[in-house]
Amino acid sequence: MMEYRLFGPILAALVLIKITLAIVIGPIIQPDSGGYIQTAWVMVNQPGWWLQLSQSVDDSVFRPIGYPLAIALAKVVGEDHWQWLLIFLQGCASLVATMCIYRLALACRAPAGLAALIALAQGTGQAVVLDQCILTDSFNASLLLIVGCRLAQGLVERRAPDPRELLASGFLVFLAVTMREAGAVLHLLLWPTVIAWIALDAQGRARKALLLVCFALPILGGVQLYKAWNVLRTGQAFLTTGSSQPIFFPAIYLSLRGVDVLKDDPLLHGMGPLPRSESTVSVVRSSIIPYLSNTYGMSQLDIARYGGRQFLRLWLDYPAEMAKLTLSHIREKQAMLAVMPIESYETAVFWATWKWPLPRSEEIREAFSQNWFRPDLALLTVGRGVSRALSILITLAFVIGAPVLAIREIWRYGPHPERYDRVAMAFAGIWIAYFGYTFSYASIHLELRYLMPVEPMASMAGVLVLVSFLRWVHGRRARRGVVKG
């Protein structure tokens, strides 16, 4: 238990940060918050809502029901203070995820002090912002981080998989699906770690099959039950119609790049040129959806399904253009998420007030041009620079180092995975999940907050790869010194 003593002060510091931010800026409402709140109000005020909604008018078929349900429960319990209760619960879930990151770092042979710093970086990262927001991202990320860390920790520790733990993990994944429906597909990125753990540490084929079923059943069964519920409400089996908007983004992006992908589209070829707008969502809402609805009588569900078919056609007909588009959505800021306490604070305040609490880079340059002796601005500049430099180093260490470690194990032991280093295997699983999330979202629309379920694990792995590399360099220099001596 000695290694857990260092986590106490980290936990206390993170609780203090969350309380302070909650007092200073309160719950943060974002543009997407309105749909969730509206659906929650229907739940609270309309008995029988769960059978009376239609896919043409209600937001609960556009978005999954999990987060509106959480808001409704917070409203029933907290009444006028429901927002505060909700961000309190989000903060608690986030702290549990931080604890899981800490435990996974310890299992991956990190010293307790380093594991505590990794946990602190995670707790002062994007979680600082999104735990305060009335958005799905905090709960979704916390649930998936808890599952991802537990699976990787079991693999590293060579524990025999427990059916109850895998059943609970599958249930948490399904809860995450009810927060963000993309999880119905993205949960597949957890399976390499699940399969490796079960294959290496479970005994007997029947036992292994049972364990796989325990993990899969809550996810697949839960999704099918959700679809059955939608049959009762709308007469059709589906999860959500949320993809009816973003699924058309690639076609719009390519059109803006001069690639006329709509001229060959079976339904959209006669729509005419797309309007110019800074908002891709507004283009979809004002042009594509009304055209499909008015011309072909398509419902939101029909439009979502057609958008999925069009997205696949784009990859088949324009693979090079889609690949370039996907890569263009991966921004350099993604490499700066590992250590970001200053930027997280700034973003949280800006989202709450629409005012930056600290001077921006251009303001600092102007201030220095008028008076070079500004120690406060110098300290702020150094802090930002160090955070970004560390983040880039950690990200590069993970992106390059994790696959190198995996290849090294394969080179050493060939087709004998039971002999592979388990930390290298866990890092390989995290690497697959990280890039799976990155490219899945980048192929349509990527925001940095979408990476919260995987980025903290990637940063943890990057830190440990970097530290291991520095130790290797130091040891090699020491050995050279001994030989010369």
Image (cartoon, grey):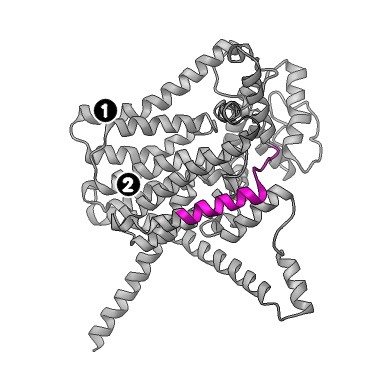
How many numbered discs, if any?
2
Is 75 placed above or below 110 here?
above
Magenta residue span: 12-31
484 vs 81: above or below: below
Dot 2 corresponds to which residue? 153
Depth order, front residue of 123/401: 123
Asked if the magenta segment contains residue 26, the reply would be yes
Q: Residues within 10 Å of mark 2 (few under 14, many from 20)?
A: many
Give percent across and percent down for residue 399. Answer: 45, 56
Say if 208 sits above or below 106 in the image: above
* Amino acid type indicated by mark 2: Gln
**Residue type at tag 1:** Ala
Find residue 8 and report its horizontal and vertical position in percent: 40, 55
Dot 2 lies on which element?
helix
Q: Residue furthest left?
A: 204
Q: Which residue is mark 1?
A: 209
Residue 125: name its quadrant. bottom right
Q: Residue at x 66, y 32 (%)?
A: 80
Q: Residue at x 55, y 12 (%)?
A: 231
Which image quadrant for residue 196?
Answer: top left
Identify the main secondary structure in magenta.
helix
Secondary structure at badge 1 equals helix
Placement of 172 over or under 124, stated as above or below = above
Q: Position of residue 1 (x, y in %)?
A: 28, 54
The answer to whether residue 277 is seen in the rendering is yes
